[in-house]
Amino acid sequence: MSRRKRILALVGASLAAGAIAGAVWVALPLPYALIAPPSVGSITLEDRNGLVLRSTRAGDGSLQRWLALGEIDPDVLEAFVAGEDHRFYDHHGIDLRAVGRAITENLHAGRVRSGASTITMQLARLLRPGASRTWGSKVLQAVWALRLEAHLTKQQILEQYLNRVPLGQGTIGVDAAAALYFNATAAQVSLGQAALLAGLASAPSADNPFVAPDRARTRRTLVLGRIGRYGYATADALERASREPLVTLRANPPFLAPHFTSRILQRLDTSAASGVWRTSLDLPLQTALEAEIRHTVNSLSDRGVREAALVVLDNRTGELLAWVGSPDFWADSSGQVDMVVSPRQPGSALKPFLYGLAFDRGYTPASVLPDVARAYATSTGPYQPRNYDRRFHGPVRAREALASSYNVPAVELADRLGAASLLRVLHGAGFASLTRSAEFYGLGLALGNGDVTLLELANGYRGLAAGGVWRKTEWRAVGPKQQSTEDRRFVSEGSAALVLDILADPTARIPGFGIDTPFDFPFQAAVKTGTSHHFTDNWAVGVTGGFTVAVWVGNFDGQPMRGVSGITGAGPLLHRAVLVTARRFAPGELRSPRAAGATRVRVCALSGLRARGGCPDLDEWFLPGTAPAKDCDWHQGGAIVWPAEYVEWAEQNGKAAAGETAVGTTAADKPAATHGASQFQIVSPRSGDRYEIPPGMDARYATIALRASTMPGVGAIRWFIDGRQIRESRWVLEPGTHVVRAVSASGASDETRIEVTSPRR
């Protein structure tokens, strides 16, 4: 036998073996699970009072209903056969005439222009989704079509196909599509409706009547023409069908609180879940707040504002009462962006957590912080923070600094406490979006340079209302909750109470915001705003005893607004949202510092020390063991004796004019200094400061900054703790009473005494 004959014999044997194997495979029974009607568990989401928010679909979010072939209107069967595969009853899964035509047309065009898929081949693709649209996949579909035809009748194939074919808008099968487009079932549709459904099979998105009515009408006309050509309907019936409206006018099915319900469906195991789910949302509140969001965007559109968002939490249970992710879920551009869970920079809205940390470290609302020009060394160069009003305010008490949202004192406080300590507190408060290191954020973390979500912000403030304890939010109506193992403390109860007391103090915010603000309510409410760099994001949070409201105003694409701050942007929206919420949910009372054991002490409004004659005085809250033991020594004989670090500020702001004030130090053993004299003084830590090491904290992060106020010429500074030299400018806290001493190269020195306590159990 020649070599050529041997090769032909081998090829023939291979083809024969392949044919036999293929025949055997085709003859194998079909897996029942492959053709079994899918178990479709519909889900209905209700608000907390039983009002329907949204009715779902199958596990993948699609609408699907299975209808037996005998129950489907004959017009539907005829329309699909005429429109998709008019030789359906004549072939055995593969239409060889259509294959020949498609090959000829595609070769002539040089690309794939025409297909030859039969209804059986399309069913094969639907039963085995995910295959690519290549010649290889077409061959595989054809082989599967042969197998389907070998085991199923034409009626069974048609029933499978009509119940599995996607028909746009998430509908699967003719019955679900009929319900959506015509408010009917597939058992009772007209000829025109049947033709429209059949026309959607080839391009359910492009030819959808809701999206492209002209294309849908053209496609319906094409199918009606084929129905007439193959003798399934008379000319009169086709004429009437062509004049039918595309879809039936009807009330839209419930699809309310779209961002909220979409989020729930993402979290639910919809392949297993079904039935009615009662959520925590309050629909009347949701509807009213959606209107407020739209009003805000419309009123600020001339200032470059296009989007806004809002979320409301029940403080006691953590239930989500309202959730508005954008002004219009159906907007053409980015309407489905959900700003409740999209991270952005919150600006000053993170400051309360910094002050909560400070109060746990021994600071008090009366502690005086420097609001003076200062540069901080960073890896990217000197960092010189500035306040929103571009002014320096000299010595400011922590209450005023937080309530008025001054930036400079906040950065100084972050430098003393450490960015790592602040980041630890923020993580404890639930800000999981802050995924970078403390070194990455640096001191700017105090001013909100890290991205967080509106939901994280709202729940963090809710944690302050809960006494410094973070708890997870709830999307279901659960009622009062017991303590969970997931609960975690991020600041002490007393510190949380002090922070909220400050944020609810209208007098303390006057220096920064003025008298007329949108933050005054007929009930107690703690309020904080935040504006990111270049006015790209604007935030505001309001906390009452009963609920927390957080709002965001800005643009999804990051375009800056034109001069929109917390007072003019998010503030008015927050004001209206809080009042609307209060009409449905009791505001309640915020936890008083007294409940955490705090007492009120009369202090000097300037120095924060115990007031005496000649001091402008006021009452301030102090947690146990933190009240100042020292009387004010800033006011002496009708004059002010300024600490060294405020000398330059006092001179520049007319506070040290001759005959009005004296300029000097406050140490009892030092005489008052005269104008221009060399000054050297420890400013961190101050004498009498008390620090507590937070429980469970890594010792590396329990540190304080060592800082001294100097004048030119004093040279380098050496630091000593209890006589032991410290090589760094930050000291790791150790329990006990300590003497901190600073010595300059020129011989000037100063010392302070502080107390550090172990964590309270």
Image (cartoon, helix red, strand yellow):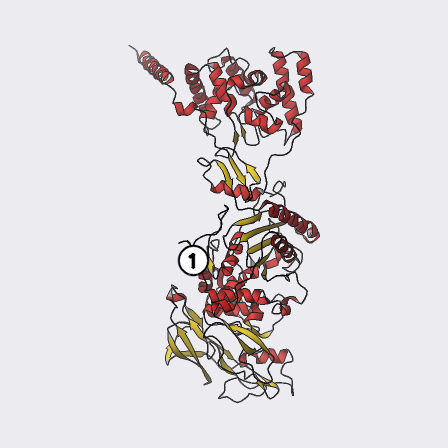
* Residue 664 percent across, percent down from the top left: 55, 85
Residue 59 drawn above or below residue 562:
above
Query: Would you call the spot at circle 1 few (<14 residues within 10 Å), some (14-19), or many (20 or more)?
Result: some
Q: In this picture, is 368 found above or below 282? A: below
Vertical arrangement, residue 224 with respect to residue 275, above or below:
above
> Which residue was labeled with disc 1?
488
Q: How many marks?
A: 1
**Residue 262 position in % (x across, y down):** 53, 41
Q: Does residue 532 sit above or below 294 in this rendering?
A: below
Q: Quadrant of the C terminus?
A: bottom left
Disc 1 marks which amino acid?
A: Arg
Quadrant of the frame with the N terminus? top left
Left-right relation of 738 to 645: left
Q: Nearer the viewer, residue 205 or 191?
A: 191
Residue 219, image x and y in percent?
Answer: 63, 23
Question: Can residue 710 be seen here?
Answer: yes
Residue 241 in the image: state x and y as whole percent. Answer: 66, 18
* In the foreground, 704 or 514: 514
Residue 406 appears in the rendering: no
Secondary structure state at the residue bearing disc 1: strand
